[in-house]
Amino acid sequence: MARSAAAKKVAKAASTGAGGKGAQTDRNLLFPAAIALVIVLGVVLIFVARDRRAENAPQGSPTLQDHWHSAYQVYVCDEVSPLAYPDDSGDDRTGIHSHGDGLMHIHPFVSTVSAQFATLGVFFEEIEVTLDDSALQLPNGTVLREGEFTCGTGDDAVDAELRVLKWNTLGAETPIGFRENLQGIRLNENGQLFVFAMVDPALDDEDIPRPDDAFLREYLGLPDEQRPIAENPSTDVGPTPEVPAEDAPDTTEGGGE
Ligand SMILES: [Zn+2]
Ligand SMILES: [Zn+2]
């Protein structure tokens, strides 16, 4: 009996350890503290994940139901390129691409390229053409790079700069000029105009011609009163032939168009 009591004493001494009672109290608190920390972290993670999900959710237009058209033009030094990027319809994975008609067809069929994710970068990736902040691939396949490509000849030659001009609506007279994050430029309206320009950095945005939007207007079948009033219609807007309403193309074409 006495032996057993002694053994218990030894065992107790061993369990409380060198630190005595204080250390045991700390250890007893450690477990609930760890549980509390796990719970707090879990709750924080839930909120972070929810925030991130909201951030990554498509918000706005174009939706999967939209089918928009915008026009683009390529401008090199002082010349409009008459060429259009080739038809990509046979290999269209996202629905933001070209039919080889000088228009950007924007009919996203996956949400990852809809709303805020419908960008120039998606368009160029889909048609497999290079566009980043310093290089532009022309419709003929040539890639023009900042630091390599120059405008002007001889002593007048200057390193060209890549920029994108965007007219937010078909009625907009003045473009917004972009020089960086070109892939992130949004396709956020039906009937926008774009110019992909490799030009003298000193050239004003206003000296780059607005794209000829006649074909796009015809395509969208807009009434006259919505046509822009340019300062100099003969040079600023280009030809805008009258299109009888019944001949205007159907803008609610099917998914393949
Ligand atoms: Zn299409
Ligand atoms: Zn289309």
Image (cartoon, grey):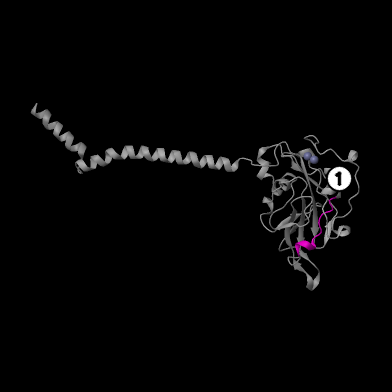
Q: Which residue is mark 1?
A: 218
Q: Nearer the viewer, residue 13 or 67?
A: 67
Counting from the top left corner in percent of width and height, residue 50 is at: 53, 39
Going by the numbered disc 1, the residue's amino acid type is: Glu
Quadrant assignment, res 29:
top left
Q: Residue 240 location, x and y as percent?
A: 89, 51
What residue lies at 89% left-to-right and 58% top-to-bottom?
A: 234
Cβ at disc 1 under 8 Å from ligand 2: no
Outermost residue, bottom side: 155
Question: Which residues are drawn in magenta?
Answer: 204-213
Does the magenta portion include 208?
yes
Quadrant of the image occupied by residue 34 = top left
123 and 166: which is toward the camera: 166
| Residue at the left extreme of this rendering | 2
Residue found farthest to the top: 1
Q: Residue at the spot x=11%, y=30% of the render?
A: 5
Q: Position of residue 252 (x, y in %)?
A: 80, 36
- Residue farthest toward the front in the current orientation of the protein: 225
Q: Secondary structure at mark 1?
A: helix
Give ligand 2's quarter of the image.
top right
Q: Is residue 141 above or below residue 31?
A: below
Residue drawn at the location 31% of the way across and 40% of the way down: 30
